[in-house]
Amino acid sequence: MGSREEILAALRSVKLDQTELPDLHGDWISYEDPWAQFAEVLVSVGGTCVMCDSEDDFRKKLSENELFTSAQTIVSLVDGIASKGCDIHALEDPHELQHVEFAIIPGEFAVAENAAIWIQGSRLVHRSVLFLTQHKAIVVKHSTLVDQMHQAYARIKIEGERFGVFVSGPSKTADIEQSLVIGAHGSRSLTVYVVKD
């Protein structure tokens, strides 16, 4: 018997006692003002939070976003906002999204604890739009906020889904000296528009 087989046999011979899974019902964290918490954390990870009183207010504030108005190529997956220079529904190869400057994407719900937003894969057409665009905006309804990730995981609907992801802030990386670089290998900015419903 070789050393590989000996190691594997030794591992297989160890019998561990069965343990019960922990009870996840408990007094998890909650926030007095969860949207203030969300906005604070989002800013700390390099994003921007824009509160909107209505759909019309959202459109107005989006039209004031210089990154949006100056973009030559826009992909919009949000009703009422037109794409520009790129029809994502007509693309077969997701690599063709490499020139997208601005993407507007609907979020399912937001999490106050870490400023994450759940993006449902079935609404994306090509999931690479999340990562290839230079700048992205996520639109989320005010009523969808949860306090923490325990509540968030309970809300995820995975039946029939091929993909889903939590997004929080733009792309970033830090080296050993703690020098933070925004937009290192993905979107250079993230703006979250919170629309009251």
Image: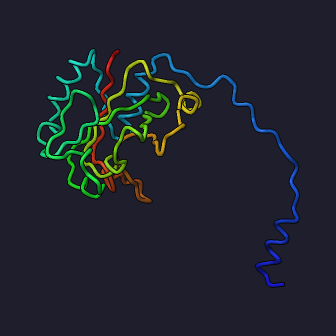
* Outermost residue toward the bottom in this view: 2
Position of 148 relative to 47 (above/below): above
The residue depicted at 20 percent of the width and 54 percent of the height is 99
Q: How is the image coloured?
A: rainbow
Along the horizontal axis of the image, is 141 left or right of 133? Answer: right
| Residue 154 rendering spot, x and y as whole percentages | 58, 29
Q: Quadrant of the C terminus?
A: top left
The residue depicted at 39 percent of the width and 54 percent of the height is 173
Position of 112 relative to 3 (above/below): above
Query: Which is more toward the observer, 90 or 11?
Result: 90
Position of 14 relative to 4 (above/below): above
Along the horizontal axis of the image, is 82 left or right of 114? Answer: left
| Residue 22 rendering spot, x and y as whole percentages | 75, 35
The residue depicted at 83 percent of the width and 77 percent of the height is 6
The residue depicted at 47 percent of the width and 29 percent of the height is 111
| Residue 20 rendering spot, x and y as whole percentages | 81, 39
| Residue 1 rendering spot, x and y as whole percentages | 84, 84
Evaluate whether residue 182 shows in this view. Answer: no
Along the horizontal axis of the image, is 88 left or right of 44? Answer: left
